[in-house]
Image (cartoon, helix red, strand yellow):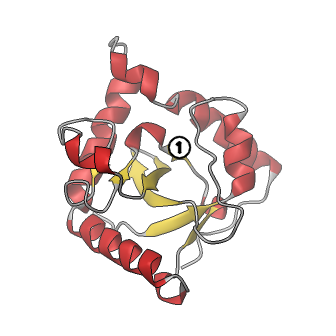
Amino acid sequence: MSELLIYEISTEYTEFLSKYDEKVPHEHDNTGKRKYVGVVLTVYDNKYFAPMSSPKPKHKTLPSKMLDLYKIKDGTYGVINLNNMIPVPDSCVKKVDINNLSDEKYKKLLKNQSREIKENATTICKKANKLYNLITGNVETKIRERCCDFKKLEQKMKKYITKFKEQPIEQ
């Protein structure tokens, strides 16, 4: 099991994918105060970026068994929105240097999220793979309405890669 780290994702890439699937989140904070962050995990043969959301009161009341999200420390530190995970080439993500963030409150939140994510990496990855299987399978399910079209986005990622030279993830 590889370690799950927190990454930010390219605005250009999320805007590209959002043209093909309206569920692709592209909520970049243009003020520079907060990064659009998530975890990069492997789902079968592809790397996926699963966006994170800061804590909200509703996160604590959502059932933990929901397949399309992972509650970070029971929602205390927010959630990972597995329903919005998107395939991502290495060149479109960059590891977040948490220690160099100037906003101390945000830095503390990301450190807490990072610790919890690392401790629960296996569970998170299993949940992501299970969701992927459900959504890409032939089973009709309501959850599909909340999820990105993973197979379609994998094809669009390949199209994106052919347009731009691939570079490795920055460590």
Viewer-proximal residue, 97 or 76?
76
Image quarter of residue 137: top left
The location of residue 61, given as percent across then percent down, is: 21, 42
| Number of residues whose C-alpha sits closer than 10 Å to that of mark 1, classed few (under 14), some (14–19) or many (20 or more) | many
Residue at the right extreme? 163
Residue 12 screen position, x and y as percent: 75, 53
Q: From the viewer's perspective, is 15 left or right of 47?
A: right
Pick whichever, 59 or 24, lies toward us.
59
Q: Quadrant of the N terminus?
A: bottom left
Give the residue at mark 1: 86
Residue 103, compared with residue 34, is above or below; it is below
131 relative to 38, above or below = above
- Choose top left, top right, bottom left or bottom right for residue 33: bottom right
Q: What type is the residue that disc 1 sits on?
A: Ile
Residue that lies at the very extreme toward the front in this rendered image? 57
| x and y percentages locating residue 43 in the rendered image | 40, 46
Residue, x 53% and y 75% (percent of image)? 96
Left/right placement of residue 132 relative to residue 150 reads: left
| Residue 164 shown left or right of residue 65 in the figure | right
Residue 46, compared with residue 21, is above or below; it is: below
Q: Residue at x 36, y 66 (%)?
A: 4
> Element under label 1?
strand
Q: Residue at x 26, y 54 (%)?
A: 75
In the rendered image, residue 90, in percent from the top left (x then y), is placed at 60, 61
Counting labels gives 1
- Residue plotted at (69% across, 67% down): 167
